[in-house]
Image: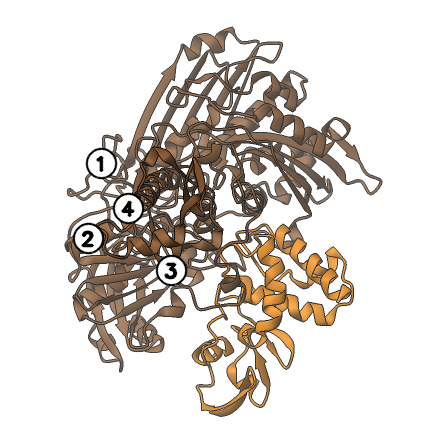
Amino acid sequence: MAYVNAPVRKKDAMSLVTGKPVYVEDQIPKNALVVKLLRSPHANAFITSIDKTAAMKVPGVVCILTHEDAPKSRFTTAGQTYPEPSPYDRLILDRHLRCAGDPVAIVAAETAQAAERAVRMIKVKYDVREPLLDFRKAKDNPILVHPEDDFKALCPVGADNKRNLCSTDVFEIGDVEKELAACDVVCTRTYHTKANNQAMMETFRTFTYLDEYGRLTVVSSTQVPFHVRRILSNALEIKKSQIRVIKPRIGGGFGAKQSVVSELFPALVTMKTGRPASIIYTREESMTNGSPRHEMQMTVRVGADQSGVIRVIDLYALSNAGAYGDHGPTTIGLVSHKSLSLYGGLSAARFACDVVYTNTMGGGAYRGYGATQGIFAVEAAVSEIAAKLSMDPCEIREKNMVAEGQIMHTYYGEPCNSCALDRCMQKAKEMMQWNEKYPRKVLENGHIRSVGVAMAMQGSGISGVDIGSVEIRLNDDGFYTLLVGCTDMGTGCDTILSQMAADCLECDIDNIAVRGVDTDQSPYDTGSYASSTTYVTGMAVVKTCESLRKKIIEMGASMLGVSVDEVSFDGKRVYVIADENRSVTISEIGYASYEGHNHCLSASESHSSPVSPPPFMVGMAEIDLDPLTGEVNVIDYVGVVDCGTVINKNLARVQTEGGIVQGIGMALYEDIRYSERGTMQNNSFMQYKIPSRLDLNTIRVAFESSYEPTGPFGAKSIGELVINTPSPAIVDAIYNATGLWFDTLPVRAEDIALGLLKK
Amino acid sequence: MVVTITVNGTKYTDDISPDLPLLDYVRSKGCLSVKRGCETSNCGLCTVHLDGKPVLSCSVLAVRANGRQVTTLEGLEEEARAFGAFLADEGGEQCGFCSPGFIMNVLAMAHELDDPTDEEIREYLAGNLCRCTGYQSQLRAIRKYLTSKKEG
């Protein structure tokens, strides 16, 4: 293997570092209309009238669309495989405004200035209602977020709009109450995690135009081009055959762009006017009306015996869908599947959940997708029960962690075929010098140095649902074209899939031209989310290469006038095994396939996996805590990852470092807050603080690879896993420093300082 | 008002609106490397050099550049490639959206600071946010770049 497991440079790297115009905004046609939105100042209101007469008189304004002009079919903007589990609860423009910032009118003008001026001149009368803002009071509240009769759920997720329920579920394995009663120690605590914004550097943005065939072309910063095609068809009430979606380079996604956010507005303008149209979300719009992580409240009961064997975990999760149910019914499942399954020997486990509507911003997909919240709660509770047992938090995990060969009863009953969690723990302890540093040391300046630990897992794609397809063509002179439908969002999947193809075809990676994504031309792929691309689409690459090799061998054999059994292919040539001097080069085969043959050499295979093998990780934080101010600095973080075979050493490492830092942001800084009226208070980078360079010290990453038999080259996923350990590891470290458990994120300095004063 | 601004060595005379940010002015001149990531001068994506010094072009009016030299990444292609190669070899560009502003500030730092410590590097670049990388790979790239420059 020349490329797999090597630190290969990304194929698009030099374009990116030299600032080439490869993103959506750089490619907007000069004559495109600028689209701006009038947004609701109220969290719950009905529009009683809209007067756009004055606004229409602003020079340069071309059209202003309101709910009266928009189609009336409800749909979901969640980028999921059809039939989507997320309820159909949206309109492009609705008379009922369900959260602050909901769109009231779409304005399209020749210039941004004209559009902005017109937005300010639209006169709207609102029937303002009391908003439902506290998700703990949402279920069966008389204030209904979705009172409409045409609300519908395509899947049986337990949605009931007359009870503010987006979904509900419960499962139990064994007898939880009986096991809890039999435990020596039980630890019960309720945890609260906030909505977090993905804060990708490129905000939501799209431009649209009618192409030479009169079809709607949508160029968008999206993770899910094929889902965008379907969602736009649903929302605009036009045929899917009339829509083409193109994804250029995109400036980060982290799940935010697994929903349709900005696409609908310019699309509707183009359909109404026939003109190209574009929208660039401001940072404020991205913050107030994006698709953030679901806020959750989780109650955990963990029971163990005196020796530290964890026998039972009971978990209840309440999730705030916000105003719309995008990803609500699906994120909640991961809360339990990807936390409880870290523990292999449970005699009983239970998970119950409610996902409720409120008049806050609708949630969406954010890296980790519920697993992050669930792992925070369960891992913090496990650390607490270890403390109750006076046990090292690493030791209780070593005693109970899931192991290769076990059946994971809380993970769809899947077998654990690849797991190096034990080695991850051992390696992390060595790297952190855990035994020397645990639990704390008080420095001369009074600061406390302490360490904390957590484990994590995720999935690799959605089993039985996600599909990855690729096509590989042999061209003249023997180079290959690799067409992919998955979406590189900076993560480097175009490159790692090329690495796999180059190894399978035994060629130079520069001999592979990769191209994604255009729904008219790329083979179908569900898109890049759910940690699917390396694992699912990667396997499609392996299968496609096998098919193509077969065709190359057939053609080579036929050119040599022998049977296929008599030849072999080494990437450069097809040769007769018995007489290696008789051969045809791949270049000759390429040329020949273009001349007088009935088959150009091309192969396309799809892959879907019946299982979703979890990657695993151990994270350890070392913090410096000032007991006078409560300020916490993460001075060192160690992450040891089992993602199966590492396909690209550099990119896997950077994924891990980046995920850890996002996780540190979630643990210590990031906190979406609302006013009493339901408007977001911290809607900018000035107020919503993501980690900067100054917030970090060293982050050290290592890999302990297992081999996943169902993955390409033994690989599993990495993208989401890596955000999951910082919150519980830091909360554990704060306990080890202060003796206080914090159950609400982010843990702010003032909470720690006040906690210490009260102690 | 009428201004004369030199962008990457080319002199332009334009009648511009007094409230036009420098960011939008240079983009209108085809300097599409310059990105906007926020509206609050927090992200550093729009960093350009004004008479050789890094500024946030979202927060500088184009009229302030009257009679001055503006340099964007397009004007520093060679240096961008030299440092960019180190960044690429760490995988530290990721989505690449913050790279142009970040690289403009790295190049300014390399001129301004002699043999900076990690702490000095962090402080100089504190205003350049990145959501993908967690900054570690960028620091590795900067270290290697500075060493290679020193070794000539």
Looking at the rendered structure, whether the residues under marks 2 and 4 are on a common chain is answered as: yes
The residue labelled by disc 4 is A524
Please, what is the three-letter code of the amino acid marked with disc 2? Ser
**Disc 1 packing (10 Å; few <14; some 14–19; many ≥20):** some
| Mark seen at residue B36 | none
Q: Earlier in the sequence, mark 2 or mark 1?
A: 1
Residue type, numbered disc 1: Lys
- Work out whether mark 2 precedes mark 3 in sequence or the reverse, and give the earlier one: 2
Q: Identify the element where label 4 is drawn.
A: loop
C-alpha distance separating marks 3 and 4: 17 Å
Q: Which chain is orange?
A: B
Secondary structure category for the residue under label 2 = helix
- Visible residue check, residue A681: no
Mark 2 chain: A
Which one is in front in this view, the residue at disc 2 or the one at disc 1?
2
Q: Which residue is mark 2?
A: A233
Mark-to-mark CA distance, 2 and 1: 28 Å
Quarter of the view holding residue A148:
top left
- Circles 2, 1 touching at the beta carbon (< 8 Å): no
In percent of width and height, residue A35 lies at: 30, 68
Q: Which percent across, then down, holds residue A372?
A: 48, 36
Q: Position of residue A37 (x, y in %)?
A: 31, 65
Q: Which residue is disc 1 drawn over?
A: A162
- What residue lies at 48% left-to-right and 17% top-to-bottom? A405
Q: Colour of chain A?
A: brown
Q: Amino acid at mark 4?
A: Tyr
Position of A507 with respect to A7 (left or right) is left
Tell me if I can see residue A757 in this picture.
Answer: yes
Pointers 4 and 1 in contact (CB under 8 A)? Answer: no
Residue underneath mark 3: A248
What subunit carries mark 1? A
